[in-house]
Image (cartoon, rainbow, N blue to C red):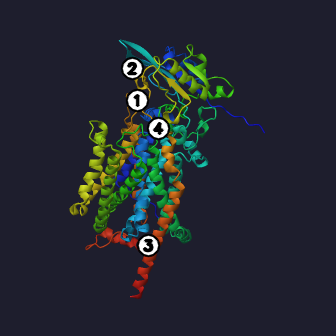
Amino acid sequence: MNWRIRLTWWDKLLLVVMAIGAVFAFVRFATGIATVANINNAYPWGWWVSYGIMTLIALGGVGFTMTGLVEILGVHRYHPFVRPAVLMGLLCYSSMVTVLMVELGRPWMVWMIMISWAPTAALFEVGWCAFLYLTVLALEFSQVPLEKAGWGRALSIVRAIYIPIMILGVTLSHLHQSSLGTLMTLIPHKINVLWWSDRLPLLFLFSAVMAGPAMAILEHLAAARWLDFAPRMDLLAGLARIEAWLVGLFLAFQMGDLVYRGATDAMFSESWFAVSFWVEIGFGLILPLALLVMPEVRASRSGLATACSLIVAGVLLLRLNVVVIGLRVRHWETYFPSIGEVAITLGITAVAIFVFGWFARILPIHEELPLPEPSPRPAVQAARAFRGAEGVS
Amino acid sequence: MTTTTVIPKAMIQDNTRCIGCRACMVACKSWNERPADHTEFFAGAGYQNPRDLDSNNYTLITFNEITTGAKPDWVFGRQLCMHCEQPACASACPTTALTKTELGPVVFDASRCIGCRSCMQACPFLIPKYDYENLAPKIHKCTFCADRLEVGLEPACAKVCPTGAITFGDRDDMVAEAKRRIAEAPGTYIPEIYGLEEVGGTSVLHLSSVPFEQIGYITGLPKTPMPNLTYRWLRMTPGVFGILYAVFAALNWIVRRRMRHQKGEGEHR
């Protein structure tokens, strides 16, 4: 089995980003959190938690969203998206664990969660669920390298347990995606009324579900471009329709929640909270929804890429708003992420993207994809050769 | 078999008796072995030094310039861990590094801490602080001198207070005492005990001559314990897990049956 690839210019760019992140990570471990990060006593959670933990878990939700859509709701035409989605989930969760090791004050003690009993702590539940789900993702994805390496016995074992494991993964995801919201319900006095809600668990779960198809579409477009195959625009358009529904329903849910709580005044108050709220809603939900309801946009690569990027950015901003921007502490306290905080998370994200690109070139990730193409290009023919490999359910 | 009933302790912080000498801050540093630190003057309301609690200062007397009657006056307030009856910090800790002891103190066990700082985020009074500059950081907050309480001593701050602004005793007695003081001198006190009902009650009870929000206290907190905000969701976890798994498994079974069916028809054709 050949693990080698030829590095392209974007592989090299990612390696540079990784190197910069590694330097900052080294400083963090050599001299302490205070040297590289701006997180402080008033804002104990900053960019590392809002992006590196909360957003990466939400984006990693693409794994359970696409798996659930295909295997549990039975929409089998999207089966080609499952493998890339599971790999994205695996990499997002692995990156999250890596950020956690940087972010925790005492990362060498993290196993303590496993031997504790803290049923009142949301992080206890998130810790367990995310750990188990990471195992599930690794098992699900292990089919691909096993298939490629031709290890028949190991592969048959993994396939035998696939169905119960897959259902376990989707269930665990529902639990910890919502528990991340539960975590934040503890501080109603600290989070601005625009974001603190009794229904934060559902808001977090639904927004993670909403991020799923958007991530799948973005991945497909990127893979088609960089791995040089023709994107399945028929499937993307269908997925974009589902995504439009999800965004619309989420928008209705979030707005309905605000009206139900009587927090509509805060939406129109003159404050930075309201500004951040409208950026989140306007650019993260309303604009992409308006784009996705247009058939021309659903049929266009750039249109889909724009709409889905906005949705993903909106999910990030929702996490930022709940964890950092919407926080009310002592009035003189401020927080803005430092270069070191951002560089470390970018480095870890670059590792994930690099590994994805690497695996996509050496493993049959997209093997089910290149389909009706009137005039197949050489790359497409090469990709079709992969289809000789046994498909996985 | 002997049973010992532990009587929970509490402390009254009577701000009307405070003269701002900060002996409590010195005694606290001394007992908890916190180093002296270099502080800076800051602009804006308040005059205390340092401005806020941090990893080296577990308690703080706040200096608040308040106009009472015709002239401005210093009114003192105090920040320290409230030692909630049902602490949000302990409920948020995924490794039970923070626990409420029977005597009253909420204590921190560094050997269990993973450094997630949930407790800092959870605390409604913004009390736990962190030493980010350390390679093995710890949560820092008032301990209620739990080690002194265990051997029958009173907290260091209560021991040194020269004006009787800090009173230590059994919680029931302290609640009665606080009520008695307000009843006896309604002109001196506002009719409110901060900590009696806040977040379900705390082990530190504050009295004041002016409304608490004027002297830097966090007001408007719920009267119900905080941990239930998350626990009412989290306790559903096992049930939700079972229901969701069953529903997903059923759907998956239907989907696979339908697929087998379609395949079967295809072969017949």
Question: Is residue A358 visible in the rendered structure shown here?
Answer: no
Residue B72 x %, y %: 37, 13
Real-space Cα separation, disc 1 to disc 3, in angstroms? 54 Å
Residue sitting nearer the eye, B48 or B269: B48
Real-space Cα separation, disc 2 to disc 1, in angstroms? 14 Å
Q: Which is more N-terminal, label 2 or label 4? A: 2
Real-space Cα separation, disc 4 to disc 3, in angstroms? 44 Å
Q: Residues within 10 Å of mark 2 (few under 14, many from 20)?
A: few
Residue drawn where x is 52% and y is 54% of the image? B237
Label 3–label 2 contact, CB within 8 A: no
Name the image quarter holding the C terminus of chain B: bottom left
Q: Which is more N-terminal, label 2 or label 3? A: 2
Could you say which disc has been placed on residue B42 in the image? 2
Q: Which residue is mark 4?
A: B121
Chain containing mark 3 = B
Residue sitting nearer the eye, A329 or A393: A329
Q: Which residue is mark 3?
A: B255
Q: Amino acid at mark 3?
A: Val
Q: Which is more N-terminal, label 3 or label 4? A: 4
Of the two numbered discs 4 and 2 in the rendering, the one whose residue sits closer to the viewer: 4
Q: Amino acid at mark 4?
A: Gln
Q: Amino acid at mark 1?
A: Arg
Chain containing mark 1 = A
What is the residue that sits farthest to the bottom in this orientation? B269
Labels 2 and 1 within one chain: no
Could you say which disc has been placed on residue A330 in the image? 1
Label 4–label 2 contact, CB within 8 A: no
Labels 1 and 3 within one chain: no
SS label for mark 2: loop
Name the image quarter holding the N terminus of chain B: top right
SS label for mark 1: loop
